[in-house]
Image (tube, rainbow, N blue to C red):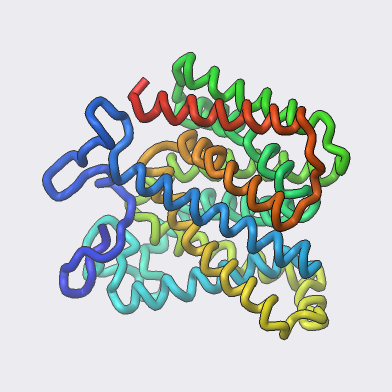
Amino acid sequence: MAKGGGGGMLLPVSGGDAGKGAGGDEAALFKGSAMTRRGAVAALSYMSCSVLLVMFNKAALSSYNFPCANVITLLQMVCSTGLLYVLRRLKIISFTNSDPSVPSDALFFVPFRILLRTTPLSLAYLLYMLASMESVRGVNVPMYTTLRRTTVVFTMTMEYFLAKQKHTPPIIGSVALIVFGAFVAGARDLSFDARGYAIVFVANITTAVYLATINRIGKSSGLNSFGLMWCNGLVCGPCVLFLTYIQGDLKKTIEFPYLYSPGFQAVLLFSCMLAFLLNYTIFWNTILNSALTQSMCGNLKDFFTVGIGWVLFGGLPFDLLNVIGQGLGFLGSGLYAYCKIKGK
């Protein structure tokens, strides 16, 4: 937990003491469970933020036909970094696992050597953000969530190569069921777009790299969730600004006909707020649980994403094969959740 200026416990963070409470090891979700109560709260928080963010991003890019996904990414970064600066300046949060009153770099709030150490994580985050934002545009929401469920395969692979982490047969079986369901669901997608599908798979790869890097660097840097988000903003913000400038996105944004529409501005505002909360809960959930659990949470929340997306945005006619594939994917996610909670 982050300590405020008066020593009060205000906001949950994740760092070296993740999973521990004031009295030692935190209680399990229930007897015999491999997941703590705090881990369960982190997982549920991530799923809620993720569903809502996909809806608002889809509304901006598709309903309003906003042409500049990178500008939304830039706005989200600026808002997140600005909010972190205010909270840290007021000592409501800390960027490290130590007390916020511990001296640190006056300009960056964290030592410069730590900022350099987190650069690989920041670059992975930049690729993840850009690919994820663009992938929402070219594919309807139901198929987007279906294809994104295959991220678990890439995540499992990255965990093995980076952390030598191996998984039990039930876990591997649940992942295989998810992937099989994704292919079944997409077998008769009448709105098939090769470019859109390719971008989603690129987003899957960058997501896997990002989550695995969080687990590797996040626990060794001495930074908590807020600190990792802060470093990401400092490194990635200028990169995205330069990218939007050379692509002419800033000019397109100024000329966008709905720029001053209250509805569009509300969508952007909620998108920025949810992006901050989502980034925080990704760090929180990944460090408290694991990168693979984070990916599986993304699959479990897809039940709501698919349903809401179908109602609000459409794009995919009813098809029995698609429903069967979606069901297999959810069944695989449920199997993984059962194995994780039961400690298998």
What residue is rendered at 58% in x and 39% in y? 208
Give the quadrant of the C terminus.
top left
Residue 133: image location, x then y, percent: 68, 56
Q: Nearer the viewer, residue 202 or 266?
A: 266
Residue at the limit of the structure toward the top, as seen here: 169
Residue 160: image location, x then y, percent: 51, 25
Res 201 → quadrant: top right
Up-down: is 203 above or below 122? above
Residue 66 appears in the figure: no
Q: Nearer the viewer, residue 326 or 114?
A: 326
Q: Nearer the viewer, residue 218 or 34?
A: 34
What residue is rendered at 45% in x and 64% in y? 230
Up-down: is 252 above or below 287? below
Res 342 → quadrant: top left
Residue 122 appears in the figure: yes
Residue at the limit of the structure toward the bottom, as seen here: 260
Residue 153: image location, x then y, percent: 60, 29
What residue is rendered at 75% in x and 63% in y? 61
What residue is rendered at 54% in x and 49% in y? 120
Q: How many marks?
A: 0
- Give left or right: position of 5 versus 67: left
